[in-house]
Image: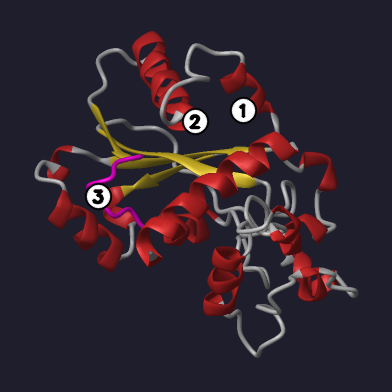
Amino acid sequence: MQAVFNLADLPEQIRCDLAEQIENFSDYRQLLLIGHGGRRMWQAVQASQFRDANDPIDSFSVDRLKSWFADNYPSCDYEMIYPDRQRVVPLQALGELAGWHHSSPFRIGINQLWGSWFAYRLAVLSDSNFEVSEKMKFSPPCDTCSEKPCLTACPADALQCSDYSLKRCINYRLSSGRLESDSSCHDQCLARLSCPVALEHRYTMAQINYHYGRSMLTIEEYYR
């Protein structure tokens, strides 16, 4: 997944927020948003030299981008602004501008092609003149889902309120995992797994457990 934006055409708030964090922001003309969909990237990471890295997916993504620029546009100046722990990049807002997703009851963006099984991997500033991407247009998949199994699949009832309850979700995840028999949300999301959209692209359980295991570590560190 990829989208190209001219910096001058970005909404003012996004442009200003980025400019405040990036000293040489004015040196660049475009922002490149890159993501992955489905299972193939995880397979590629597992077959790569980065499989045992501290953050194998980020390491793999950064390496692929550097190689692509070196092979195709060696004279192009660019700067990766995501992944970067020191900067706040509005990935969701950029994804909305690109038309990559609609909201879902379980608060993960959902795409007509990939379902919820996609993710942002890189955001890059460059002095390039690539063709600007047209916004993807598709109807919200949840609008035509009559059964909505995600609403009842969540054992924390976080989706039964008038709005998604992050507190219920986190409290349940923190309590689960203490006993092996009560660990249903420790390293997966049952609501997300129940979604019928693009099942053919659903991550393998190894990848699901990896992502949710890392998020669980972050939650535990923050709340405990």
* Left or right for 199, reference 113: right
Mark 2: which secondary structure? helix
The verdict on residue 221 being magenta is: no
Residue 205 image point, x, y percent: 73, 39
Q: Give the overall secondary structure of the magenta segment.
A: loop
Which color scheme does this rendered protein use?
Answer: secondary structure
Which quadrant of the structure image shows residue 111? bottom right
- Residue at figure coordinates x 67%, y 59% from the top left: 185
* Left or right for 42, reference 192: left
Residue corresponding to mark 2: 57
Residue corresponding to mark 1: 41
Alpha carbons under labels 2 and 1: distance apart: 8 Å
- Residue at figure coordinates x 63%, y 65% from the top left: 102
Which quadrant of the structure image shows residue 138? bottom right
Mark 1 and mark 3 in contact? Answer it, CB < 8 Å. no
Which residues are the magenta region?
A: 83-90
Residue 120 image point, x, y percent: 50, 44
Amino acid tagged 1: Met
Mark 3: which secondary structure? loop
Residue 101 position (above or below residue 125): below
Residue corresponding to mark 3: 87
The single residue placed furthest to the bottom in the displayed view is: 162
Mark 2 and mark 1 in contact? Answer it, CB < 8 Å. yes
Mark 1: which secondary structure? helix
Residue 51 image point, x, y percent: 53, 20
The single residue placed furthest to the left in the displayed view is: 23
